[in-house]
Amino acid sequence: MGTKAKTTQLMSSDYVIYIRNFALSKGISAKQLIENTEADLSLLLTPPPKVSEAVLHQILFNFFNALSNPYIGVFEFGKGLVLSLHGNLGLAIQGASNLDEVIHLATQYFKTRANQRSLQRIDGTDYCEIRLSDEHVKYDYTLVSLLLSFGYIGSELLSHHQLDAPYSVHLQSSEPEDFPWHLVDNFTLKFNQPHHQIVIPKQWMTLPITPIDPEIANLAKDQCKKSLDEISPVDLVTEIQQRLQQSHDRNISLQEMATQLHTSPSTLQRRLKSFSTTFKNIKQDVRLAQAKRMLADKDVTIEHIAECLDFSDASNFSTFFKSFSGLSPSEYRKTQRND
């Protein structure tokens, strides 16, 4: 059951209708849109409530590549992807209190939708990176339009604040010829970057936004939670592992993690138990993995590693490490030198 849910990805037909109408306004025919797909014209005329993600991606690829200047279309398309076109995610965001909650909802939503794409949040000291990845190069225009859409939506949600530092959009691709720089508005754009991502000033994350419709947002959140309950245990454990790795607090509690995941401690415990693990075990695994990575660097002392991982002293760290790895830190380090 889990495998099936992860291989058949469905998207809202609202996207199809938006793409169809936008393409027609640019003189692109319906036949051009469905090239190299298994769909027929009826998909565009009367789309079903849900559409295959793969088909939608191919339609978008056809659309952008039919434009004389795809990047002009990317800007216009991204700006038009308003909240109402993002289905339950858009509705759920309408009840959010700040960008922190908006981004949490977005990252969770992507877990229920994308096989080929993921949305990841990386917190730095001054900036928060919202990273969008896609292994298929031909969908790059779609990636850019989504990033621009998220940026425009975030700016709109915070429009009542006086914001000095603009957000940045980073793209992996090289700057194309005749790029429409005149369309870059209220943000900075950089090419040849390591990742496709939005970089947002950290202080923006907790600025209050006015909920638009909390009642319908709560209904949408419930629907998202039902979808999240169907994702595989690997996804949940990976989510917790990533949050622990990125957290500056090594002793984050079950209650704090449950709050971050917008659930209760008892529900989180129950779900992890059904996957034959516990929050404590995941924390220990993450801590052990971090210790092994640091031990691989012979220039880092064991005392420093113990301090970084919040052990009271090197002795306690050594006891922990040996109990879970079967080797003392010094013995493990020697095995790494022999590899």
Image (spheres, rainbow, N blue to C red):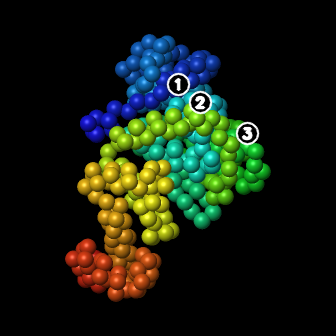
Structural distance between the alpha carbons of marks 3 and 1: 29 Å
Nearer to me, 17 or 298: 17
Badge 3 vs badge 1, beta-carbon distance below 8 Å: no
Q: Where is residue 154, by image quadrant?
A: top right
Q: Amino acid at mark 3?
A: His
Residue 24 appears in which quarter of the rendering? top right
Q: Is residue 146 left or right of residue 58?
A: right
Residue located 60% across and 65% down the image? 125
If the image is split into quadrants, where does the C terminus sit? bottom left
Q: Residues within 10 Å of mark 3 (few under 14, many from 20)?
A: few
Which circle's residue, 2 or 3, is located before the other in the chain? 2
User: Where does label 1 land, which residue?
Assistant: 14
**Residue 271 percent coordinates (x, y):** 33, 50
Quadrant location of the N terminus in the rendered image: top left
Q: For mark 2, what is the residue?
A: 84
Q: Residue at x 72, y 55 (%)?
A: 165
Type of amino acid under label 1: Asp
Q: Earlier in the sequence, mark 3 or mark 1?
A: 1
- The image position of residue 47, as x and y in percent, is 46, 17
Measure the C-alpha gap from mark 2 to mark 3.
Answer: 27 Å
Residue sitting at 40 percent across and 27 percent down?
52
Q: Quadrant of residue 211?
A: top right
Task: Please give the residue where the numbered disc 3 appears in the rendered image.
Answer: 182
